[in-house]
Amino acid sequence: MDRELRVAFVSAPYRIFDTYRKVGKHPTNGIVTLAGELLDHGITDDVRIFDGAFYGSMEELVSDVKSFEPSMLGIPGYTGSMPEAERIFKSMPDVPIKITGGPYSSARPEELLEYCDVVFVGEAEESIKEFAAAAKENGKFSPDYASEIKGLVFKDKDGSVVRTGKPRIVSDLDSISFRGRELTADHMPHYRVGNYRHLGDNFINLMSSRGCASKCIYCCSNMMHGSGYRFRSPESLEAEIDFVEDLRKKRGLPPLDSVKFDDDEFFSRNENDLANLLHVLNKRDLRFTAFVTMGATTPEKVRIAAENGMKSAFTGIETHEGRRKKVCPGKRSRFTDEEIKETLEWFRKHDVRSCCGYIVGFPDETLDDMRMTSDCMTKLPVDYPSMSVLAIHPGTPLWRWQQKNVHLYKDLVKKPFSRVDVERWPGDPDGLPSPHPEMAKGQLLAIKKEAYRAAYNDPDRIFRLMKAAKDPSEALKTMVAFNEFYFDANRD
């Protein structure tokens, strides 16, 4: 006999409500997609999304979730928000079924089973429907029905850990529901996109493909989505945009003006398919931003994208020229400084702002390596360069390397990693040990700050950006974005 199944998907806030968010604010695609699958198939009695990014405090978020009285609680696991996710789970001990998924959870399921019933590994669109249907029938979690569903990790009745095999990858992305947008519509007036994107805040974040060929050693995309590419059709993308426009209209909001694509590699399509996809945006006069890789970028793709509304592109340069093949060994990542300059010129020619990321702190880097990478932030003509201290995320090739070479890390030899711990390892990267076995986080952060100060005091960059501004509004956005990055160099 079916029981009532009330599902709460909760997105834990990153590092407790950081008010400085130049990266913007919008729902994550993961829980929106999973909630949509349950809605579309009528499996649950009620399903809601509680997104921590739109709450003012943890207490307010938890109170809202509790008042819903869920019978199933799902929180995705990301490295940056694991302490908050754990706190939310533990604050709701009476929820009958607790589930998690996402990159961190997929990489460390045994850890998550300390306070969850089930970990969904990799893509969960198929397994979540089977699991929810069985949970509705049984009213509680049972290893008996869970053992029949692929892609799960849980504890059996005797306490042993059970893995039910590889999850089913969604081969047809057009089949994925977007009805979960209904559950985030109340937050639409509060969406924010980073000024460096050069878009408006009447925007939507969309997924048009899954997969990446770059094989970067710090990334877990292949763990989550497998190898190769899968694409949504233009018709599917158009249907989702129409769906969102209708939601906005019902709430008295202005029409969309922008799209932020969350693909790992937006230029992975061939030129004809890219043009067909972007025609959907062009006929609606929508601008957009996307993540691209240097290796997949061609002059023709840049032209097609710019003529159909691309205002900015983000790509990873990561390190200085001599180390790029080590960091991103995929075929599309083997590029030189001269090739980067040429690609940036293609963007500049078509009035597309470039945003490029760098990383310092790789375990085998020398101080000279890091300084050479820092110098790239100034010498390469990127519009908005950014730098991160390396975070070694579970599930990545670097994580596996670190576990094999843990003897190089004195603090991990004394006490192995067991969870993201902001008290044990404060600072950037927050809650993780220093990525470099011989350099403290403070040293790496000092290199990052020095690089920012040099890049955002560069008169050539300032002149180039202000010259590119077409009107006072764009000039103001440029100044604000520039100051936000400069602020990053000077805040603690």
Image (cartoon, grey):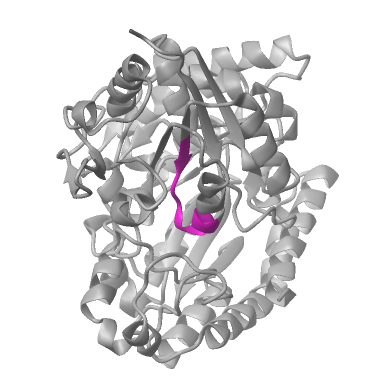
Left or right for 13, reference 129? right
Residue 245 visible in this rendered orientation of the protein? yes
* Placement of 445 over or under 156, stated as above or below: below
Left or right for 215, reference 467? left
Left or right for 16, reference 336? right
Quadrant where the C terminus is found in the figure: bottom right
State the residue at coordinates (35%, 40%).
117
Give how far across and how far down residue 20 sits, in percent: 73, 57
Q: Residue furthest right?
A: 472
* Placement of 418 over or under 352, stated as above or below: below
Give how far across and how far down residue 323 sits, in percent: 32, 77
State the residue at coordinates (27%, 22%).
172
Q: Quadrant of residue 337?
A: bottom left
Q: Quadrant of residue 490?
A: bottom right
Q: Residue furthest front?
A: 158
Front residue (pair 399, 171): 399
State the residue at coordinates (50%, 42%).
290
**Residues in magenta?**
74-83
As for residue 68 lying within the magenta part, the answer is: no
